[in-house]
Amino acid sequence: MAALPYALAEDLHAANINSTRLLRDYLANKAEADALYMDTFVKRSSIMTVYLSNKLEQTFVGTAAPAAIHATLEKIYDEQAVGIAAPDTASAIAATGGRPDLEELRMRQQLWQHVAALKYWCFQCAPGSKPFTVDMLLRTHHLLMEGLSDDDGKAVTAGAFRTTPCHSGTGFIYSKAQNIRAEVQSAVDNFNAALTTQHPVQAAADLFYAIITTHPFQDGNGRLCRLLASYAFMCAGVPFPARCATATSEAPCTS
């Protein structure tokens, strides 16, 4: 077989080097593009998770369109990403002089705290990389409910288990207060063990059911358990918060 002309061989060699460089650059850019796409998807999924939970809780006030609420949530998400502090709601409320925007300020406070709680539990706690703990649950509830009031106007005890009897509006009797810590610890331990022995959906469902039927807190149990579902699925490898719009808000804690 005749050898390739020297000039042609040189051209082919140069083309091969160039093709290799182009392929390398493409793969590098593709990785960056994929990472950017995933970051965007995670952000959108997080916003939708908070939106759906608060829609169920009837947090939204006035006649704000869904697009406007989404814009508010996106602004909150981005502000937290760059370390902007939470709004001083108390000062802002005082400055309104009792004007009708008071409820909107409170709504924004709840949304801010909900986003912060989601970011803590679903990202800072590194789901799947370290075991779930009771302290994570308490910290998330504190972030979610600090400074808020229940339906009767009573200040919510954030980040602490309830100390009074509790039943739902439908008559379901939740766990006795003195049994809450032990029952929550058992649910946490069972979930950590189940991640390696059960289907992820079953493990998440069992954890969700155990916590919601214990109803460990004075208020905020539904929205906490919807975040818990997102966390549980991320422990199993789902790369973004799952959108959970169940766990009815029509189950107030009644002593």
Image: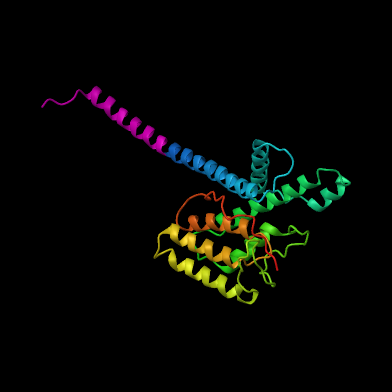
Residue drawn at x 74%, y 57% as measured from the top left:
151
Report x, y in % for residue 217.
66, 65
- Residue 127's place in the image compared with 16, above or below, is below
Residue 80 coordinates in the image, percent (x, y)? 66, 48
Question: What's the magenta region?
Answer: 1-27
Name the residue: 81% across, 43% down: 101
User: Which residue is outermost to the front?
Assistant: 171
Colouring mode (rainbow / by chain / secondary structure / one colour) = rainbow
Residue 62, located in which quarter of the rendered image?
A: top right
By secondary structure, the bulk of the magenta-drawn segment is best described as helix
- The question of residue 23 being in magenta is answered with yes
Outermost residue, bottom side: 178
Picture quarter with the C terminus? bottom right
Q: Vertically, is 14 above or below 174? A: above
Q: Is residue 11 left or right of residue 88?
A: left
- Judge left or right: residue 29 versus residue 99: left
Residue 9, magenta (yes or no) = yes
Task: Report the front residue among 134 and 217.
Answer: 217
Q: Front-most of 182 and 73?
A: 182
Front one among 87 and 6: 87
Residue at the limit of the structure toward the right, as seen here = 97
The residue at 54%/48% (across/down) is 243
- x, y percentage for residue 132? 53, 65
Give the x, y percent position of residue 26: 41, 35
Q: Nearer the viewer, residue 209 or 117?
A: 209
